[in-house]
Amino acid sequence: MEKIKYFCSNCGKEHEEWPALAYNSPDSFDSLSDEEKEEIAELSNDFCVITYSDQTDRFIRCTLTQEVNDHCEDLEYGLWVSLSEKSFQDYSDNYNNKNHEVTYFGWLCNDIPNYTFDESIPTSIHTRKGNARPEIVPHNDFQHPFVFDYYNGITKAEAERRINDMLRSIEQ
Ligand SMILES: [Zn+2]
């Protein structure tokens, strides 16, 4: 991966740009067999639908910004959330609508390494003007280390560790 440098408007110094930690699919898609992916799942850049015999799960790709306390750049995630049928339909219907600003309820659907997710994290999904991907905001009353870190920030060293872990897993 090529390292991109730019002049930071916050501190005026030249930085290496951090890559976004992006997931190409929700974890429940990744855990399907190749045959199941073919037969019951549909995946595109922004949408995923999995049709089980007893239920249908609907996911969209969003972004999440993890604040970094001792650095002028934050860590960006590309993550999937599951939406209700109604919210998913509304999001699809307005996919090309540049003035669609709404908030949905969604469950976080990617496990971030080094956290344990016994249950999904409840979040608010804010669609944005223009066609940027919606922003995930975890519910602040939910007790979980990931939610704690989201609201309290992480260190630059921790952010770099996460980036290096991601780059290593891509190279493998
Ligand atoms: Zn800077």
Image (spheres, rainbow, N blue to C red):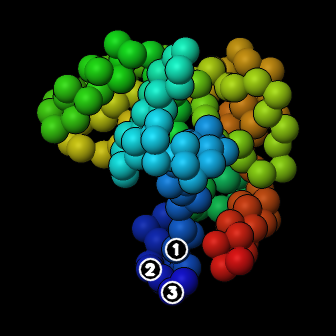
For label 3, the SS is: loop
Looking at numbered disc 1 in the image, what kind of residue is underneath it?
Glu
Marking on residue 6: 2
Picture coordinates of residue 56, whole percent (x, y) = 48, 21
User: Could you tell me which residue is drawn at 77 percent across and 51 percent down?
Assistant: 113
The local secondary structure at tag 1 comes to loop
- Quadrant containing the C terminus is bottom right
Q: Are marks 2 and 1 in contact (CB under 8 Å)?
A: yes
User: In which quadrant will I find the N terminus?
Assistant: bottom right
Instruction: Identify which residue is drawn at 35% across, 13% down.
Output: 86
| Secondary element at image label 2 | strand
Residue type (three-letter) at the residue carrying disc 3: Glu
Residue under circle 3? Answer: 2
Residue 152 placement, left or right of 2:
right
Judging by the rendered image, the residue that carries numbered circle 1 is 17
**Are there few (<14), some (14-19), or many (20+) residues within 10 Å of tag 2?**
few
Along the polypeptide, which appears first: circle 1 or circle 3? 3
Residue 65 position in % (x across, y down): 55, 46
Task: Residue at 58% x, 25% y: name it.
Answer: 107
Which of the two marks, 1 or 3, is nearer to us in this view?
Answer: 3
Q: Nearer the viewer, residue 7 or 105?
A: 105
Is the C-beta separation of discs 1 and 3 under 8 Å?
no
Instruction: Report, in whole angstroms, how far the alpha carbon at label 1 lies from the one at label 3.
Output: 10 Å
